[in-house]
């Protein structure tokens, strides 16, 4: 069964859904935000991992309308939680390179905010280092416009690309999400500790929020709590869950 062919009709057949994974603060494990993660269930193929279909959607351009759907759905859902009186936290969406390079990207963000009525400060865009480094002049202008709107910007998988913090500070960003490869077994990985403490300290000086991704164990969480990191995300706290489950988690923190 051809993935590409199935993917073409997937939006129309309503085959996509979003899961949400919480980020927590260091002190009391309070939820500080959620990340929306795309899921695809197809009648013929079953569940297909984003690791398989996103590269294809990126290649054939479908990531643009799919990404638009993700942004609109995440904004609408977050506004819904707000209306229900739940703890209001920002929702982060992953943006793919092709989506970011589209001339209409700014308008897509604006449309998602306007149609949902969500406050722009409750939307965070997760970009990767490679995306923002490819056309620095355009990126600075685009990110400045998004910041003026009030939208937040995070750099995802930080540390895996080739950018230094010296380069990163040219961009108006809010958050660094430190890649989970640095977090794995951090409590007895002296090299990982050296890298992350350099990132944490420099981020602090630049007034950036730092999130450690992929926290899976109590040992990792304990180490991070004693470090200069601000927030954590990972299976140790919660897997990505559906909107009903996350609503319960958000209401528990009221
Ligand atoms: O959720 P999961 O671990 O299966 O995601 C695998 C990969 O797919 C991750 O790199 C994640 O960033 C990416 N991904 C998940 N949801 C989205 C999305 O809505 N848009 C894009 N572009 N990537 C996503
Ligand atoms: O590239 P990005 O950071 O957006 O990838 C997010 C993906 O990471 C999600 O698909 C999510 O399922 C996955 N993820 C979240 N927490 C953990 C974790 O603790 N361990 C691992 N291995 N993956 C995680
Ligand atoms: Mn992400
Ligand atoms: Na990441």
Image: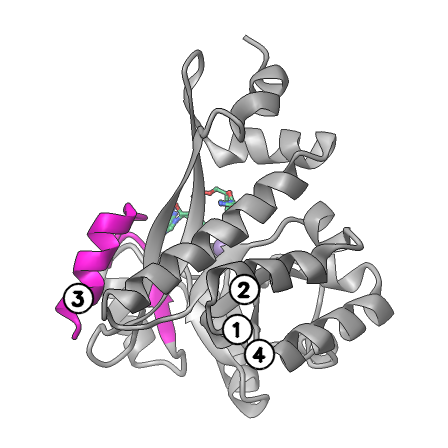
**Image spot of residue 230 (x, y percent):** 39, 79
Q: Which mark is residue 120?
A: 1
Left or right of residue 212, residue 24 in this image: left
Left or right of residue 166, residue 182 in this image: left
Quarter-of-image position of residue 132:
bottom right
Q: Is residue 131 above or below residue 50?
A: below
Which of disc 3 and disc 4 is earlier in sequence? Answer: 4
How far is mark 4 from mark 2, CA to CA? Answer: 11 Å
Picture quarter with the N terminus: top right
The residue under the point 52% across, 35% down is 51
How far is mark 2 from mark 1, CA to CA? Answer: 6 Å
In contact (CB < 8 Å): disc 4 and disc 1: yes
User: SS for tag 4?
Assistant: loop
In contact (CB < 8 Å): disc 2 and disc 1: yes
The residue under the point 56% across, 30% down is 53
Q: Which residue is identified by label 2?
A: 113
User: SS for tag 3?
Assistant: helix
The residue under the point 29% across, 67% down is 83
Q: Is residue 191 above or below residue 39?
A: below
Q: Residues within 10 Å of mark 3 (few under 14, many from 20)?
A: some
Q: Residues within 10 Å of mark 1 (few under 14, many from 20)?
A: many
Outermost top residue: 1
Asked if the beta carbon under badge 2 is closer than 8 A to the nearest atom of ligand 1, the reply is no
**Image spot of residue 32 (x, y percent):** 33, 73
Residue 117, can we see it?
yes
Q: Which residue is identified by label 3?
A: 251
Which of disc 3 and disc 2 is earlier in sequence? Answer: 2
Q: Which mark is residue 164?
A: none
User: SS for tag 1?
Assistant: helix
Q: Is residue 198 above or below residue 94?
A: below
Q: Which residue is identified by label 4?
A: 150
Which of disc 3 and disc 1 is earlier in sequence? Answer: 1
């Amino acid at each position: 069964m051809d993935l590409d062919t199935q993917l073409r009709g997937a939006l129309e057949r309503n085959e996509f859904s979003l899961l949400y994974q919480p980020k927590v603060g260091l002190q009391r494990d309070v939820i500080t935000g959620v990340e929306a993660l795309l899921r695809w269930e197809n009648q013929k193929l079953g569940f297909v991992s984003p690791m398989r279909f996103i590269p294809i959607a990126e290649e054939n351009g479908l990531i643009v309308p799919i990404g638009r759907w993700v942004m609109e759905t995440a904004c609408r859902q977050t506004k819904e939680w707000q209306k229900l009186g739940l703890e209001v936290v920002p929702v982060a969406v992953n943006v793919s390179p092709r989506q970011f390079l589209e001339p209409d990207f700014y308008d897509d963000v604006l449309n998602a905010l306007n149609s949902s009525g969500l406050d722009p400060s409750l939307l965070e865009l997760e970009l990767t280092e490679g995306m923002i480094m490819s056309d620095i002049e355009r990126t600075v202008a685009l990110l400045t416009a998004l910041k003026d709107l009030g939208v937040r910007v995070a750099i995802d998988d930080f540390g895996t690309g080739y950018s230094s913090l010296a380069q990163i500070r040219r961009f108006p960003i809010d958050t660094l999400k430190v890649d989970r490869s640095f977090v794995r077994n951090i409590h007895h990985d002296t090299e990982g500790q050296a890298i992350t403490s350099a990132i944490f300290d420099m981020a602090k000086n630049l007034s950036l929020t730092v999130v450690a991704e992929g926290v899976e164990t109590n040992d990792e969480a304990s180490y991070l709590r004693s470090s200069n990191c601000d927030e954590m995300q990972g299976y140790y706290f919660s897997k990505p869950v559906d909107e009903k489950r996350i609503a319960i988690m958000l209401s528990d923190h009221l």
